[in-house]
């Protein structure tokens, strides 16, 4: 039997629910294209992806297991970690992420 899949492109072998989180900085601005991992609390099971232009991540998550969100920098190092509770309790989760930084490309043609 194949589990349900979603944005995270990973088979889920638990009862799953579709949920959304919005990643914002301390000023309330969305963190676009931010590397995001969601993991089952205390386990080594991750779902990873990037936020969209509006700072949103969407996907299928285990329904009744505690989840954690991790935000990673360009080198793959986690700079933010937060407990989300279980997915059945968060229709939309807003995370204030301090420590995020943007990459800029400057130059001229």
Image (cartoon, helix red, strand yellow):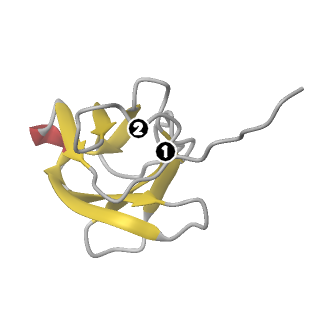
How crowded is the residue under tag 1: few (<14 C-alpha within 10 Å), some, or many (20+)?
Answer: many
- Residue 28 in sight here: yes
Alpha carbons under labels 2 and 1: distance apart: 6 Å
Residue lying at the far right in this picture: please name it.
109
Q: Secondary structure at mark 2?
A: loop
In x, y percent, where is residue 51?
Answer: 46, 36
Residue 40, compared with residue 103, is above or below; it is below
Which residue is labeled 1 in the image? 34
In x, y percent, where is residue 7?
Answer: 51, 34
In x, y percent, where is residue 57?
Answer: 40, 34
Q: Secondary structure at mark 1?
A: loop
Say left or right for 20 vs 106: left
Along the line of sight, the residue nearer the viewer: 6 or 103 = 103
Callouts 2 and 1 close, C-beta under 8 Å: yes
Residue lying at the far left in this picture: please name it.
89
Which residue is labeled 2 in the image? 31
Residue that appears at 53% across and 37% down? 33
């Amino acid at each position: 039997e194949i589990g349900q899949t979603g944005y995270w492109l990973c088979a889920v072998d638990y009862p799953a629910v579709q949920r959304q989180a919005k990643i914002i900085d301390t000023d309330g601005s969305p963190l676009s294209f931010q590397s995001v991992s969601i993991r089952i609390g205390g386990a080594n099971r991750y779902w990873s992806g990037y936020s969209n232009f509006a700072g949103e991540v969407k996907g299928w998550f285990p329904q009744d297991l505690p989840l954690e969100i991790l935000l990673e920098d360009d080198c793959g190092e986690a700079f933010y970690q937060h407990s989300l509770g279980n997915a059945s309790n968060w229709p939309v989760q807003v995370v204030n992420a301090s420590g995020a930084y943007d990459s800029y490309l400057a130059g001229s043609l």
